[in-house]
Amino acid sequence: MPGRGMLATRSARATEARRQPLLRGQRPLQPPLRRLLPRQHRRPAPPQRQSPLRRQRRLPLQRPTPTPTPTPTPTPTPKRGPGYSRNRGIAALESEFVVLLDADDRIGPDYLYRAGQKFSSDVDVVNPDAVLFGASQDRWVVPEVTTLKMLLQRNSVHCCSAFRREFWSRTGGIDERLPGWEDYEFWIRLAAAGARLQKLHGDHFFHRRHANCRSNYALTIEHELRQYLRQKHTHLFESCTA
């Protein structure tokens, strides 16, 4: 900030300039007061006006709001039958023999041991009787030996019968398109592939009977199921009836 001595000197110079005679057309010298006043007494400089175009250039860029991507709705997986689940379970096994057991059925404590003895005597499918419990109490008795010709007439092999895993691989697994009788169709292909089916004596398989079981549903579409079997195994039915 300028001192008092400097302000006094500038004021004296301005006064001396006013006393001098003016020439024609010459204006008296006006000292800039803003320079002579201390900084704290000066008026603030007026803001500089800017053109609207220049103001618009300094505005921040507004990026377009991105459109949210709609979340894809998951497609519901179609309901698969028991054939699909059984094939996946058998594929994950490394054992030589397989037993399929439904959640509502039971097996005896020595069934697997006795079935293993049967397999050691050149048997490929071990078929025990079915002891019914639940809504009805009965016993489904199976024949001593089951042949392909017998199977083409009616099913006498239970779903819980033990079988060699190599026959499952050889015949292409269980048919997943069938809504019922998938075990029946599987036994037909095993017998056609040369499997030997034999009975296992004793109480080893306990089958629960209730109103909403799949066996009752299969009876309502029995005609369609038999027609499917005849179309798929036409050569077998024709060879057995000839």
Image: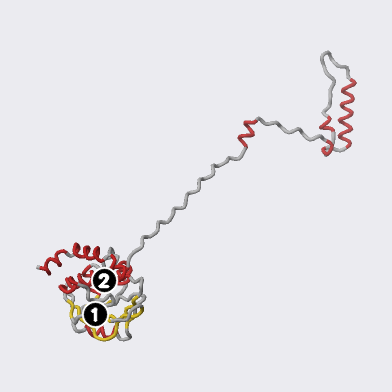
Q: Nearer the viewer, residue 102 or 193?
A: 102
Disc 1 element: strand
Which residue is the site of mark 1? 127
The residue at which mark 2 appears reads as 183
Q: Quadrant of residue 219?
A: bottom left
Q: Residue 218 shows which numbered tag?
A: none
In the image, residue 168 sits, relative to residue 137, either above or below, namely above
Three-letter residue code for mark 2: Asp
Q: Position of residue 186 (x, y in %)?
A: 23, 70
Q: Residue at x 16, y 76 (%)?
A: 147
Q: Quadrant of the N terminus?
A: top right
The x, y position of residue 203, in whole percent, is 29, 85
Identify which amino acid the numbered label 1 is placed on: Asn
Q: Residue furthest top?
A: 24
Question: Relative to 148, does residue 137 appear above or below in the rendering?
Answer: below
Q: Say which of 154 and 69 sits in front.
A: 154
Does 156 appear above or below 220? below
**In the picture, which quadrant includes the C terminus?**
bottom left
